[in-house]
Image (cartoon, rainbow, N blue to C red):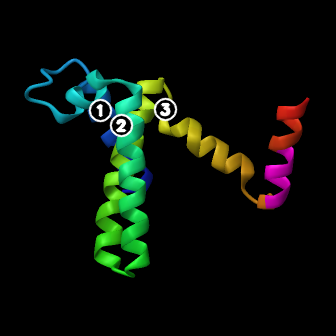
């Protein structure tokens, strides 16, 4: 089974639990709290991942990365974006220099 399937399955769980009782579902509770709270949680998990990386604690990096990806999926669901859309964007950028990609984004923003 491909690892990307795990994200797809988890994303489907997120979608399925949107309408669940917030008192019984962490996902429903977070989604009910709104975009700002979800984004804040993504930020918190990102910081915790960075702290784990600075400690060079591989087990903690893995755990915090899983938390980060989970909350990232909540953020996507809240925005109505499917993980495939992000994967498609990564695929589009594949083989492109990061500096070139960044320059292209800047030109699009200016144009």
Left or right of 103 in this view: 14: left
Q: Are marks 2 and 3 in contact (CB under 8 Å)?
A: yes
Q: Secondary structure at mark 1?
A: helix
Residue that label 3 marks: 82
**Tag count in the figure?**
3
- Per the model, the C-alpha gap separating discs 1 and 3 is 11 Å
Q: Position of residue 111 (x, y in %)?
A: 91, 29
Q: Nearer the viewer, residue 35 or 10?
A: 35
| Residue placed under numbered mark 1 in the picture | 14
- Image position of 33 with respect to 55: above or below: above
Q: Determine contact: label 1, label 2, CB under 8 Å.
A: yes
Residue at image location 85% in from the left, 45% down from the top: 104
Question: Which residue is at 82% across, 33% downward?
Answer: 109
Q: Identify the residue under disc 2.
A: 11
**How would you classify the magenta stretch by its main secondary structure?**
helix
Q: Say above or below: 35 vs 103.
A: above
Of 82 and 99, the residue lying toward us: 99
Residue sitting at the far bottom: 56
In the image, the segment drawn in magenta is: 99-104
The N terminus lies in quadrant? bottom left
Instruction: Assign a secondary structure to mark 2.
Output: helix
Q: Position of residue 45 (x, y in %)?
A: 36, 53
Name the spot of residue 50 as percent of width and height, x first: 43, 66
In space, the residues marked 1 and 2 are separated at their CA atoms by 5 Å
């Amino acid at each position: 089974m491909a690892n990307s399937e795990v994200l797809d399955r988890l994303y489907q769980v997120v979608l399925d639990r949107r309408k669940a009782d917030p008192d019984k579902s962490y996902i429903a509770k977070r989604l009910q709290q709104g975009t700002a709270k979800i984004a804040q949680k993504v930020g918190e998990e990102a910081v915790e991942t960075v702290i784990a990386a600075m400690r060079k604690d591989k087990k903690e990096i893995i755990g915090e990365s899983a938390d980060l990806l989970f909350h990232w999926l909540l953020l996507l669901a809240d925005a109505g974006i499917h993980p495939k859309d992000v994967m498609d964007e990564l695929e589009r950028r594949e083989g492109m220099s990061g500096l070139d990609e960044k320059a292209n984004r800047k030109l699009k923003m200016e144009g």
